[in-house]
C-alpha cells in the first residue's frame, strides 16, 4: 500500500514537472525565440540603413508626453526670481544712466556759463586797464599843468586861475607848492584870495 502511494506521488510529481517544463518550452519556443530573432533582424536592418538605434529610441521616448522630464517647481521658482532680479537691475541701470545724462547736461551748462563769465571778466579787465591808463595819463597831464603854473610868474597865473571854475582852480591851487601858492594869492584881489583860501581849507 505504501509502495502504491509512493508510486502515485512520484507520478504526480513527474506530471507536474512535465507540465511546468512543457509550459516553459512553449514560452521559449513561441515568444522569446521569435522576439529575439525579430530584434536581431531589426538591428541588422538598422545597421545596414546606418541608423543609430539608441539615438532613435531617445528621440521616440522624448515625444511621449508621460516620459518627458518635468522641471521641478523649485527650479521654475528660482528662474522666476532670477528673471525678476535681472529686470530690477536693468531698470536700476537705466535710472543711473538717466541720472548720469542729467549730470552731464548740468556740467555742460555750467561749463558754458563759466566760459561766458570768463569772457565778461576779460572784457572788464580790459576796461579797467584802459581806465587806469587814462587815469595815469590824466595824472601826468595834471602834473604837467601844475609844473607849468609853478614856472609861470604869479602875476600871469593869478588872472588865469580866477577865470577858471572854482573846482578846477581849487584843484590846481591845492597841488602847488606853498611858496608858489602864496605868491599867486598875493596877486589876486583880497575877495578872490579869501574865497580860494576858504575853499582850500574845506
Image (spheres, grey):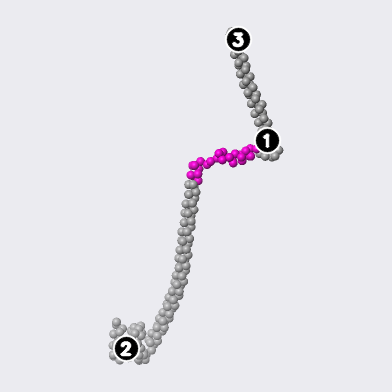
What residue lies at 47% left-to-right and 65% top-to-bottom?
108
Q: Which mark is residue 185?
A: 2
Q: Which mark is residue 159?
A: none
**Residue placed most toward the observer, 24 or 86:** 24
N-terminal of the pair, mark 1 or mark 2, is 1
Q: Nearer the viewer, residue 16 or 99?
A: 16
Counting residues from the start of the chain, the first of labels 1 and 3 encountered is: 3
Question: Bounds of the magenta span?
Answer: 53-79
Residue in front for this viewpoint, 188 or 39: 39
The quarter of the rendered structure image containing the N terminus is top right
Neighbor class of circle 1 (other Cα within 10 Å; few <14, some 14-19, many 20+) is few
Q: How far from the left and from the top, in percent, is residue 104?
A: 48, 62
| Whole-percent x, y for residue 27 in the image | 64, 26
Foreground mark, 1 or 2, reads 1
Residue 80 percent location from the top left of the image: 49, 47
| Secondary structure category for the residue under label 1 | helix
**Rendered image quadrant of residue 36:** top right
Question: Which SS class for mark 2?
Answer: helix
In this orientation, does residue 173 appear? no
Q: Which mark is residue 4?
A: 3
Q: Do the numbered discs 1 and 2 sit on residues whose CB atoms are within 8 Å? A: no
**For the point 63% across and 23% down, which residue is it?**
23
Residue neighbourhood size for the residue with mark 3, other residues' Cα within 10 Å, grouped as few (<14), some (14–19), many (≥20): few
Which of the two discs, 3 and 2, sits closer to the camera?
Answer: 3
In the image, taking residue 69 as reference, residue 177 lies left or right, namely left
Say if 86 sits above or below 69 in the image. Answer: below
Amino acid at each position: 500500500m505504501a509502495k502504491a502511494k509512493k508510486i502515485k506521488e512520484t507520478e504526480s510529481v513527474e506530471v507536474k514537472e512535465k507540465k511546468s517544463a512543457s509550459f516553459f518550452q512553449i514560452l521559449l519556443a513561441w515568444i522569446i525565440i521569435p522576439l529575439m530573432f525579430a530584434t536581431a533582424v531589426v538591428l541588422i536592418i538598422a545597421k545596414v540603413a546606418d541608423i543609430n538605434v539608441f539615438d532613435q529610441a531617445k528621440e521616440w521616448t522624448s515625444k511621449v508626453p508621460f516620459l518627458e522630464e518635468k522641471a521641478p517647481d523649485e527650479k521654475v521658482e528660482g528662474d522666476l526670481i532670477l528673471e525678476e532680479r535681472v529686470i530690477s537691475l536693468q531698470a536700476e541701470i537705466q535710472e543711473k544712466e538717466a541720472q548720469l545724462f542729467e549730470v552731464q547736461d548740468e556740467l555742460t551748462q555750467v561749463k558754458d556759463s563759466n566760459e561766458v563769465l570768463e569772457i565778461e571778466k576779460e572784457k572788464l579787465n580790459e576796461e579797467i586797464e584802459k581806465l587806469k591808463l587814462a587815469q595815469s595819463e590824466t595824472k601826468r597831464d595834471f602834473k604837467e599843468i601844475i609844473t607849468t603854473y609853478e614856472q609861470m610868474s604869479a602875476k600871469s597865473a593869478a588872472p588865469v586861475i580866477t577865470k577858471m571854475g572854482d573846482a578846477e582852480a581849487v584843484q590846481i591851487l591845492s597841488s602847488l607848492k606853498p611858496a608858489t601858492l602864496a605868491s599867486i594869492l598875493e596877486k589876486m584881489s583880497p575877495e578872490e584870495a579869501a574865497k580860494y583860501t576858504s575853499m582850500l581849507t574845506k
